[in-house]
Image (tube, rainbow, N blue to C red):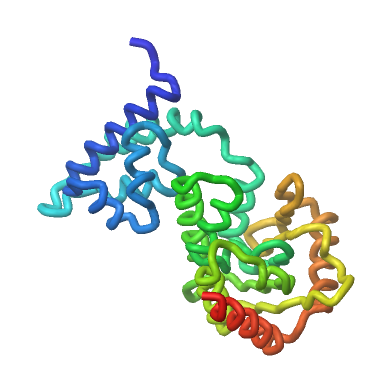
Amino acid sequence: MPEPDENSAAVRLGEELRQLRTAAGYPTIQAFAARIDGYGESLITKVEQGKRTASKQLFPAWLDACTVNIDNKAPVLTDALRRALTALWELALKREGPIPEFIELWLKREAAATFLRLWALNALPGLLQTYDYANAMFIQSGLDEDEASDRAAVRIQRQAILDGPDATQVTTIIYEPVLHSLVGTPEIMATQLEHVLAMSRRSNLVIQVVRDTGYFPGRRGQFEIASGPKIADTLLIWTVQDQTMDDPVLVGKSAALFERIRGYALTIEESRALMQEALRRWQSQQ
């Protein structure tokens, strides 16, 4: 029998995942979607039909939700079945195309960092975004609703590094026009700014705003820097060609640029006042 190609593997995987879902006690896609919060019914349907391959976040979440039958707690997912499904998933995943290496490296470094510096020139950083803001931004970039939903869910999951006793320390500088740039709807923007204001009160976050009053350094592009004892200082540049690098000279220059930009920023309290002003503007448009 010939080995399955990527397309047939996706179809077989979808059928296997459907059977796993029902065996685990989720007779409907609606019930399963409620169990793995953040993933819509349409996306789950497409995965089971083989039209989409579960992402690196959705696939393990799917397996974890189906480990035992929810009604009688009987084992459903054996180690052998998990390995077989994983092998089939890895083959099916090739159809989706490789995930850019630059973002794979960044996600690893971000998760291991103890300190992050974020320069938000064009959009709020992912670590500060609400689900609705992220979802709307992905849709505006041209993704379909399912893929946008999937990516937004992943973005929210990344924010776990901001919680707990060993929460990552983050300093964010936001360019003022970002607060007034519509993403989605005024309601989404108002909720987003409320979220950023709440985050600005946390002890591990510093959020400052640079006024749009003329020249200042940092207009070339948005970037982020991850630092910590377990990783090399790492730079993520959001430009025409996004890239991650840990060249010490380039990272050092970017760290120096970040401090120059910060020199133009308002104080923490002045920044909160400016964000409150932007919030009132969006609330008045609802």
Instruction: Say left or right for 198 vs 220.
Output: left
Q: Quadrant of residue 98?
A: top right
Can you tell which quarter of the image residue 143 is in? top right
Q: Residue furthest right?
A: 215
**Residue that protrudes farthest toward the top in the picture:** 1
- Rendered position, 191 above or below 123: below
Q: Position of residue 136 (x, y in %)?
A: 53, 58
Residue 203 appears anywhere in the view: no
* Residue 237 drawn at (x, y percent): 74, 54
- The quadrant of the picture occupied by the N terminus is top left
Residue placed most toward the observer, 43 or 104: 43
Which one is nearer the viewer's eye here, 270 or 84? 270
Question: Residue placed at 23% from the left, 43% from the top?
Answer: 21
Q: Position of residue 194 (x, y in %)?
A: 53, 78
Residue at position x 36%, y 38% in the image:
47
User: Which residue does the image show at 39% across and 19% down from the upper left?
Assistant: 4
Q: Quadrant of residue 170?
A: bottom right
Residue 105, placed above or below residue 131: above
Q: Where does residue 46 sit, x and y in percent of width and height?
A: 36, 38
